[in-house]
Image (spheres, grey):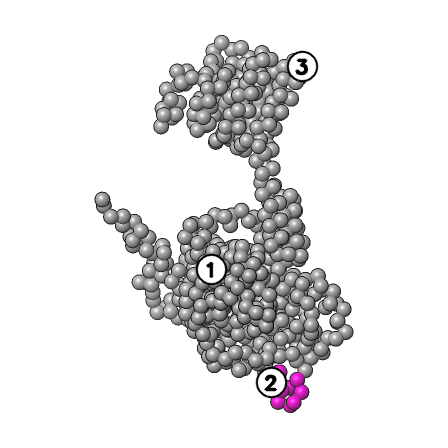
Amino acid sequence: MAPNTRCCSPAALQRRLPILGWLPSYSLQWLKMDFIAGLSVGLTVIPQALAYAEVAGLPPQYGLYSAFTGCFVYLFLGTSRDVTLGPTAIMSLLVSFYTLHEPAYAVLLAFLSGCIQLAMGLLRLGFLLDFISCPVIKGFTSAAAITIGFGQVKNLLGLQNIPRQFFVQVYHTILNLGETRVGDAVLGLVCLVLLLVLKLMRDHVPPVHPEMPLGVRLSHGLVWTATTARNALVVSFAALVAYSFEVTGYQPFVLTGETAEGLPPVRAPPFSVTTANGTVSFAEMVQDMGAGLAVVPLMGLLESIAVAKSFASQNNYRIDANQELLAIGLTNVLGSLVSSYPVTGSFGRTAVNAQSGVCTPAGGLVTGALVLLSLGYLTSLFYYIPKSALAAVIIMAVVPLFDIQIFRTLWRVKRLDLLPLCVTLLLCFWEIQYGILAGVLVSLLLLLHSVARPKTQVSEGPVVVLQPASGLHFPAIEALRDALLNRALEVSPQRCAILECTHICSVDYTVVLGLSELLEDFHKRGVALVFVGLQVPVLRTLLAADLKGFQYFSTLDEADKYLRQDPGAQPYHACEDSVPEHRIALLKA
C-alpha cells in the first residue's frame, strides 16, 4: 500500500504552520515595520492589561500574565498578520462573571476553554459559529460595553464597596454619588478628555509623504507615536501626578496598589483549590463555573475570528477560520501554565497593529518581550497608577463596542432582525448566557419560519401558477398544499394548477408524500396538477417515488398549452421511457 503523504506534504504543513509561508522571504524592511508595530501594541497592551484585570476582578498582575503568551503562539499558528491575542474587555467581563473573582478559577477556565477550542479546531467545527447571527453579536457586545463602561464609573469617581451585578450596581452607584472623591473624579475626567483628544488627533493626522521637509516628517512621527501610545502616556501622566502627591504625604487618589513582582511561575493549572472552608475539588470548580465553560470558549472564538475576518477583508488577504481556532485554543492552554485567564483577539490592539504597518505576525515578538520586561522590572511602579486613570482607559476602549448605527441599519434593511438584537441586549444585563442563548433561539426561530413559510409567487388566471420563491422542505408542504387547494380546488369553477419548481433544489420524503396527496386530490376533482422547471436531483427523487398522475414539462408555455387542451403539447410522465434522452443522461449521471 502506498504511504499517505497528503498530511505531511509541504502545502499541508504550511497550512498547519503558517510561519513557513512568510519566514523564508522575511526582509529587513519587514523587520523594521514589525518592530514599530510590536512596540506600539506593547505600549497599548500594558496599561490595558492592568485595567482589564480590574474588570475581571483579579489582581493587576493577572492582566499582564495574560498578555504575552498569545504573542508567541500566534507567531507560529496565526493566519492574519494584524491580529493580536490577549485580554479584552468582553473576555474580562465574562471571567468576572463565571470565576467568582478567584484567580484559580480564572486559570482553570483558561485551560478548559483552550481544550474546547482546540477540539473544535481539530474537528473543523468552526461552522457552528455561523449560527450566531450578527444582530445577536451586536446585542451582546453593546450590552457588554454598557456593563463594562458603567462598571468603571465607581473607579472613576473613587466610590467604594459597589456591587458588581449590573442593576444593583447602577442603584448603588447613584445612591452613593454623594461620596464621590474629588481627586479621583477630577483626574479621571482629565484622563478621559486627554484620551479623547489624542484619539481624535490620531484619526485626523494627515498622511506623511517622502517629499515633505524633514522637520514636518519628524513632527508627524512624534504626533503619531504620542497618539498611538496614548494609553501608556495618559497612565504614566496619572501615575506621576499620584507619585507627586505621595511625596508630599497626601494622597487624594485610590491607587492600584501592590503588584506581584517578577515573571509568573510555570506550573499546571489548579485542578483543586484550598479555601478556609476546605478543599474545592475539580468537579465542584467545574460546577461553579457552569455555563461559562460553553459561553467563554464560544465568545472567545467568535470575537477572535470576527476581528481576523474584519481586517482580512480590509487588507485583501484570506484567513483559515479553523486554524484561528487552533491558535486561540493553544494560546489559552499554554497561557494557563503561566496563570493567564482566557484571552482572545483584541479589535482595538489589532487596529493599532494594522495602522502601524505590521507586515507579519512577528510583531508579536516585540509586544510579548515588552510585556515580559514590564513584569520583570516595572511592577513596583504600577503601585502609583490611580484606578481612575485605568477606568478612563477602559471606558475609552469599550465605547466603540456600542454600535448605535446598527439600530438604524436594521430598521432600514430588515426590521425583524431588531428582535434578536433587543432580546440579546436586554437579557445580557441580567445573565450573559441567557441573553446569548435567547438571541440565538430567536434568530433560529426566524430562520425556521422562513423555511416553514417560504414566500410564494402566484399567478391567477384560467390556470393557477404557483412558484415557491425558495426551497421546499417538510415544514412548508402543508402551507403549499393549502395554497394550491384554496386557489385551484376550493373555487368555482375549479382550475388546473402548475407548480413552478425552478427554485427547488431538493425534496425530502415528507415533501414527496405531500405532493402525492396533492396529486390525488386534484385527480379526484378531475383537474390536473403539473410540474415545471424540475431540477435533476428533484426529478430523480420524484421519479423514484413513482407518484400516481405525476407529469411535468420543461417550460411554463408547454404546460399552459397542455392544460388548455393543445394537442401539440405532451407531458413527460412518471416513467423513464417518457423522459427525453438528454434528461435520461442527466438522471443516470
Q: Position of residue 378 (x, y in %)?
A: 50, 80
**Residue type marked 2:** Tyr
In space, the residues marked 3 and 1 are separated at their CA atoms by: 67 Å
- Residue lying at 46% horizontally and 74% vertically, measured from the top left: 264
Estimate how packed mark 3 is, as few (under 14), some (14 to 19) or many (20 or more) residues with alpha carbons within 10 Å.
few
**On screen, residue 529 above or below 106:** above
Q: Amino acid at mark 3?
A: Ser
On screen, residue 273 above or below 528: below
What residue does disc 1 label?
114
Q: Residues within 10 Å of mark 1 (few under 14, many from 20)?
A: many
User: 505 or 357, which lies in front?
Assistant: 505
Residue 274 is a magenta residue: no
Q: Position of residue 178 (x, y in %)?
A: 77, 74
In the drawing, what numbered circle is on residue 439? Answer: none
Highlighted magenta segment, given as a residue range: 241-251
Of the residues under marks 3 and 1, which one precedes in the sequence?
Answer: 1
Is 408 left, or right, of 264 in this rendering?
right
Marks 2 and 1, how far apart at CA: 40 Å
Find residue 243 and name its label. 2
Lower sequence index among marks 2 and 3: 2
Residue at the outermost top position: 567
Tell me the residue that label 3 is attached to: 492
Q: Number of labelled discs?
A: 3
Residue 218 in the image: state x and y as whole percent.
48, 76
Q: Secondary structure at mark 2?
A: helix
Q: Nearer the viewer, residue 202 or 41?
A: 41
- Identify the residue at horizontal 48%, vertical 21% (top origin): 555
